[in-house]
Image (cartoon, rainbow, N blue to C red):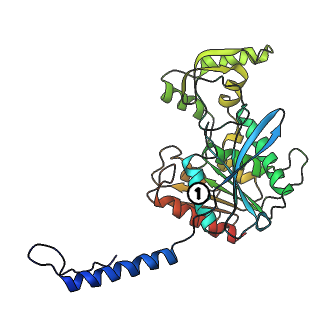
Amino acid sequence: MNRLAITRTRRGSPAPATAAVLARLLALTMTLLLTIAPRPAAAAEQVQIEHRGINLLAHLQLADGSSLADGALLMTHGTLAHGRMEIMATLQDLLAERGLNSLSITLSLGQSERRGMYDCTSLHDHRHSEAATEIALWYDWLAAQGAGPITLLGHSRGGAQTAEFAAAPNRDGGARQPAGAVLVAPAVWWPGKLADDYQRSHEKPLAPILARASELVEAGRGDEILENTDFVYCADARVTAATFIDWYSGSKAMDAPGSVAASQLPVLVVAGSDDTVVAELPERMQGVADGERVRFEVIDGAEHFFRDLYAEDLADLVEEFVAGL
C-alpha cells in the first residue's frame, strides 16, 4: 500500500488544507473498496440423506450465479473430523469465490446427524472402510440433483479414502464417472507403519491389543467392547473389537499413492513442504506422479492444514486442475 505523506503542524495534527484533502481521499477510497470488493459467497446449506437408519449430513455451497449443472467438488474430511472443520469450510468459501460449487460431507462414523469432531468419550463402533460407501452415496445424490462433472476431493485420511473410491468408483455395480480427484495431504501406509505410529503416539505396542481384538472377531464377538483402549488420538477410549481391527490391521486401501497408481482418473496431489503429519508423501509420490494423469504439487511453507494464505494457494491449484479436466 502506498503511504500518503501528511504535513503536520507543531501540535502534530494535519494542516487544515491537507486534512481536507485527506478526508476526500479517504471518502474516495471507501467508495472504491465498496465498489470492487468481492461479494461474499453464499453460506453453505446443510443437506442430508438417509442410509440404513442413519441421517448423513453434508454442506452444499454454490458459487454466485452458478448451479449444480455446472459441476461440483465432492469433499471428504480427515480423521474423526467433520465437513465444517476449518480447512473444509475455508476451502468451500475460496472455491465459491472462484466459481466452483462444492459439497463437503461429514462421514457418519456410525452416528446419525453427526456434527463436530468425534467425541472421544463416545463408543467407537465405526469402520474406516465405510467411507467409500458414504462417498458413493453422496456422489449419487449429486448426480440425482443434476450435477455436472463431479470432481472428488479429500484431505488427510479423507484423501486416502477418496483415492480408494477413485480407484474403483463402481465396485458396487454403479455407473459413476468422476471427472478427477484432488488429494490434499493424503494419508500414506506401508506394512509396519501403523504399529510404529501407535508406539510413538501411545508409548505402547500395538500387537497385543490387535491380537486380542482379532481373537474376538474370529470368535464372532466383534461387537465386544475393548475398554480403556487408546485409539487414534483418543486415550482410554471404548472401542469395539471389529472397529479396532478395521482401523489398525492395515491395508493398501489406506495408502493414497497406491490407490492413485491403481486409478484411471486424472489426479492432483497437493502436499505442504512443512507438513509433519504425512512427511513421507513426497517420497511416496515418486514413481507415481507422471506430470500428466497424476500431477504432484508442493506448496512451499504450508503445513498439514494449509491455513491462511496457503489455503488461497491450494484453491488456485484446485481451480486450475478442474478447469483442465
Number of on-image labels = 1
Instruction: Name the residue at 86% across, 55% down.
Output: 144
Of the 4 image quadrants, the one containing the N terminus is bottom left
Q: On the picture, is 80 further left or further right than 170?
A: left
Pick the residue in front: 167 or 40: 40
Which element type, helix, strand or loop, lies under badge 1? helix
For the C terminus, the quadrant is bottom right
Which percent across, then down, holds residue 112? 74, 33
Q: Which residue carries the number 1 mark?
A: 91
Question: Which amino acid type is shown beneath numbered disc 1?
Answer: Leu
Q: How crowded is mark 1: few (under 14 residues within 10 Å), some or many (20 or more)?
A: many
Q: Which residue is outermost to the left? A: 10
Counting from the top left corner in percent of width and height, residue 249 is at: 68, 28
Q: Is residue 90 above or below residue 118?
A: below
184 to 38, vertically: above or below: above
- Residue 63, position as x, y percentages in the image: 67, 65
Q: Is residue 132 left or right of residue 244?
A: right
At 77% across and 63% down in the image, what residue appears?
68
Hey, which quadrant is residue 150 in on the image? bottom right
Q: Residue 32's x, y, as percent?
A: 46, 79
The residue nearer to you, when weighing 182 against 116, is: 116
